[in-house]
Image (cartoon, grey):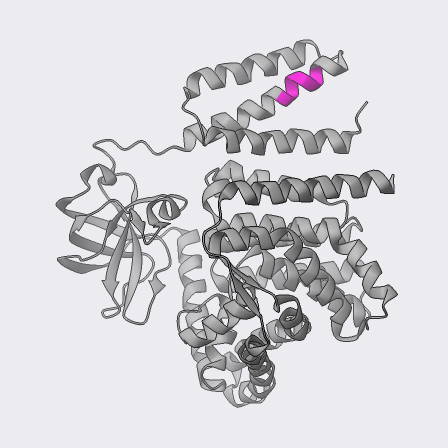
Amino acid sequence: MLRKSRLISIYLSLFIIGIFSANFFIFNTFYVFCMLLLFLVMSIVFWGKKKFRLIALSAVFLFLGIWRFGISEEVIDKYHIAYYANQNFKITGTIVREPDVRSTNRKITVRPDDYSGLILVNAPNFPEYEFGDRVKVKCMFEKPGVIEEFDYGQYLSVSGIYSVCYRPEYINHMGESELSTGQKIRKKIISIKYKYKEIIDQTISYPESEVLSAMTVGLRRGIPDNILDNFRYAGLSHIIAISGLHISIVTLLLMNFFIAIGLRRRHAFIGATASLVLFLLMIGFRASSIRAGIMGFAALFAMQVGRLKNGINILLLAAVLLLLINPKLLLLDVGFQLSFLAVLGIMQFGESIEKLLTKIKVPKFFEIRTSIMMTLSAQILVLPLIIYYFGNLSIVAPLSNVAVLPLLPFIMIAGFLQGIVGFIFLPLANIIGYLTSAAVSWIIIVADKIQFIPLSSIEFGKIDIIYIMIIYMVLGWLIWIKKYIKK
């Protein structure tokens, strides 16, 4: 009979498979729900028969995934704002998310008063439209489509947005709406974040200030394009993106750092968790950051209980919780996919790679060995998907990551300390700024110089998804062989 841990893996995996399969066929959610109830009743009635119970519960989780995806589909009717696509329309509503501030404009997400659904509106930077503000917008609302082979509509649908306003006729500011306690707290956090950004700008020179702001609070719009390109070619984009890969690596490095300075594992876990919560608070608890945080905490918790290599159930549970909230993440959110695969790679290959690094005597100080282990193990499962989505493979990514990852815990801790001190006494924050600026400058230099290594990056162009699926099937088979040999 299968062990309980293996059964849990099967059930959670079947839920994910149900969501995956539901993307490819049309079905009636009512009939799926009836099948779900039928197998649930059968599992209860025949609970004493273990094999029958296993089959019935497997069917329950499979149909639960299919049903959850089915009820997530948006109903576009006359009560939904997307119903009025390609019409000149006037709405009054509330900005319900933190604006995405660009150099020339800001994108605001508006919830209309009289219709369901959300609208993404291109607004000017002045006057400043903020979270919680009331606005009146007149615009030709459009359904987002495909832009240069990128399906912008599908990308926005993950966030519940099915209508966009690219060129509003006018936007009138109508003051602030009455906010709930939670919304007031969120607005205060956003204001603190931008005050933190001002302190960083005052205490560190450009462009180091922009990179540090991206790493600590997720504000990356001011980073010059040439630096963004350098980071991409060097395989360092993840350190300036709020992703599960970034948060997982940072939190695990922080935990190792706290252990290295003498804290017990339990205290190190508390310290790393507190750092993660502070990070999410400063980011503003956006949907993408919460998803990344859950993935990071899954890896952190697995490490705390001493089962990083066997933490698959923790990771699957984190994924299932996220997919219960939003099942569209599975196929439409690249960040979710990369986060899951990165943490899975660390769990499945981390121990073997660390043994190899120990054997060849890679040093442990400054977390060099841990950084190399996390970089290589995460990249094993992430690289095929990166090649598929971006058509580019950074050959020097392991080298560049090894050169900069040991600095991440220091930069995160010092960066937050710099902001906190800046609220109290700005000259002291300037002193801390010299240290963080030097560390960030090193990262920028590595990203700039490493691309000159011959064959540092390979361009693949568009690759058929079938080849990526074959690669992952082979990797899955290798994982199974590895576990079989170990047994």
The image quadrant where one finds the C terminus is top right
Image check: 21 left or right of 98?
right
Image spot of residue 99 (x, y percent): 34, 61
As drawn, 469 above or below 73: below
Residue 47 appears in which quarter of the rendering?
Answer: top right
Residue 48 appears in which quarter of the rendering?
Answer: top right
Image spot of residue 25 (x, y percent): 43, 26
Give the magenta part as a residue range.
53-58
Comparing 408 with 134, the one in front is: 408
Image spot of residue 329 (x, y percent): 48, 43
The image quadrant where one finds the N terminus is top right
Comparing 122 with 441, the one in front is: 441
Residue at 80%, 70% in the rendered image: 260
Residue at 48%, 65% in the rendered image: 218
Residue at 41%, 19% in the rendered image: 28
As drawn, 137 above or below 232: above
As drawn, 341 above or below 25: below
Image spot of residue 138 (x, y percent): 14, 52
Image check: 39 left or right of 268?
left
As drawn, 73 above or below 419: above
Dominant secondary structure, magenta:
helix
Q: Is residue 57 magenta?
A: yes
Q: Is residue 264 visible?
A: no
Residue at 50%, 73% in the rendered image: 230
